[in-house]
């Protein structure tokens, strides 16, 4: 592991350490970020998302103490197990509330949340909408495989009509959600779409999302080769499909234009659909805290506490 400190021999032979300035620190290497061998099935799309996350960390010189990787439960949500960094593999559908706490208490961190379509839009659907509308600063990558992979093939909220699964043996009859429309309508301020079969594009979207000040959402198509093989072939030129990027004249600040892009039939478009600036909950809360502090700046912490207790009497 690259050391963030310089070693200075002190008198008496002891070693003391002084932090190296950021400009002199090396970026982490893949070897320093990769943890256990991923347990995904050979050929699973999730491998490329993980590899590109490592690339992002390497490229942008993100150090261990600057990043947090959070997930819910699912094959895709095993993600933090495979990253040698701070993070948590949390509860199914509850990654976003957990991440919100981290973001609001440590807005200086780069916070990445990874998960699946079931985790994000089924059990976690409610949290998705509220985290988006609150514009809490983090990057949320949903590895959409149109199925519940970990639990071995149940219909997910993004499964297409007619999809045969253990929960819909005669074919799915429920209208699937459109993650892009849902993200925009919920109030996400950055909404992008990519696919695991185009590594450069995934990296480009992750970088743009990371640089966005607010809740940034990426739908990344990630094939489940075990339970929905070939689902995304129509978007993969190597399989005879078409990969169409967002037209150059698309206005990313135009909500209606974003819906229009999202309305295109599969394989649709790939790129940034929507990107606007709106104050984050992080900034708004920080201001409330600062204003409150200003009012009581002459008091010691225990005196503020005492005042609060007195008010409750
Ligand atoms: C509260 C709760 N309900 C249900 C489950 C069972 N469960 C685990 S993962 C999962 C769905 C996974 O699908 P998805 O989020 O799409 O991830 P994938 O495995 O496809 O990557 C379910 C229903 C659970 N672990 N916890
Ligand atoms: S079951 Fe599907 S999603 Fe899960 S690891 Fe295997 S290929 Fe990937
Ligand atoms: Mg899934």
Image (spheres, rainbow, N blue to C red):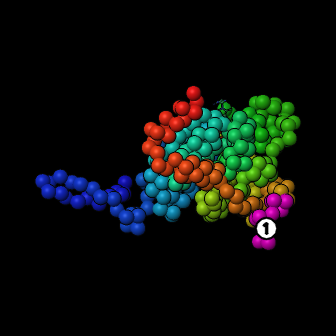
Badge 1 element: loop
Pick whichever, 22 or 86, lies toward us: 22
Q: Is residue 261 visible?
A: no
Return the x and y of residue 294 as percentages of the image width and height.
Answer: 53, 52
Q: Which residue is drawn at 63% across and 42% down?
A: 96
For residue 248: magenta? yes
Return the x and y of residue 55 as percentages of the image width and height.
Answer: 53, 59
222 up-or-down from 29: above or below? above
Q: Residue at x 60, y 44 (%)?
A: 100
Quadrant containing the N terminus is bottom left
Mark 1, residue position: 251
Pick whichever, 185 or 261, lies toward us: 185
Write down which quadrant ligand 1 falls in: top right
Return the x and y of residue 260 as percentages of the image width and height.
Answer: 85, 59
Which range of residues does the magenta coloring cover?
246-258
Q: In terms of image quadrants, where is residue 8?
A: bottom left
For residue 112: magenta? no
């Amino acid at each position: 592991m690259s050391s963030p400190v310089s070693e200075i021999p002190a008198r008496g032979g002891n070693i003391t350490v002084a932090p190296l300035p950021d400009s002199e620190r090396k970026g982490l290497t893949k070897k320093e970020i990769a943890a256990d061998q991923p347990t995904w099935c050979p050929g699973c799309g999730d491998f490329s998302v993980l590899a590109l996350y490592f690339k992002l960390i390497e490229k942008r010189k993100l150090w261990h103490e600057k990043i947090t990787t959070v997930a819910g439960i699912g094959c895709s949500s095993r993600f933090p197990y495979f990253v040698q960094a701070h993070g948590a593999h949390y509860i199914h559908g509850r990654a976003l509330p957990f991440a919100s706490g981290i973001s609001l208490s440590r807005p200086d961190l780069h916070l990445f949340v990874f998960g699946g379509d079931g985790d994000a839009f089924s059990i976690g659907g409610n949290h998705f909408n509220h985290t988006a509308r609150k514009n809490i600063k983090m990057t949320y990558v949903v590895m959409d495989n149109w199925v519940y992979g970990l639990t071995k093939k149940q219909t997910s909220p993004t499964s297409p009509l007619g999809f045969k699964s253990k929960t819909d043996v005669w074919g799915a009859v429920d209208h699937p959600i459109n993650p892009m429309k849902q993200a925009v309508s919920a109030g996400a301020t950055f909404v992008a779409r990519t696919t695991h079969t185009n590594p450069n594009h995934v990296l480009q979207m992750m970088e743009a999302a990371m640089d966005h000040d607010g809740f940034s959402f990426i739908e990344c198509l990630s094939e489940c080769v075990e339970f929905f093989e070939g689902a995304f072939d129509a978007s993969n030129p190597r399989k005879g499909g078409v990969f169409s990027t967002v037209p150059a004249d698309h206005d990313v600040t135009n909500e209606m234009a974003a819906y229009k892009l999202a309305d295109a039939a599969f394989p649709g478009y790939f790129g940034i659909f929507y990107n606007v600036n709106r104050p984050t909950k992080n900034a708004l809360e920080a201001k409330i805290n600062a204003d409150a502090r200003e009012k009581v700046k002459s008091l010691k912490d225990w005196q503020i506490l005492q005042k609060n207790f007195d008010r409750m009497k």
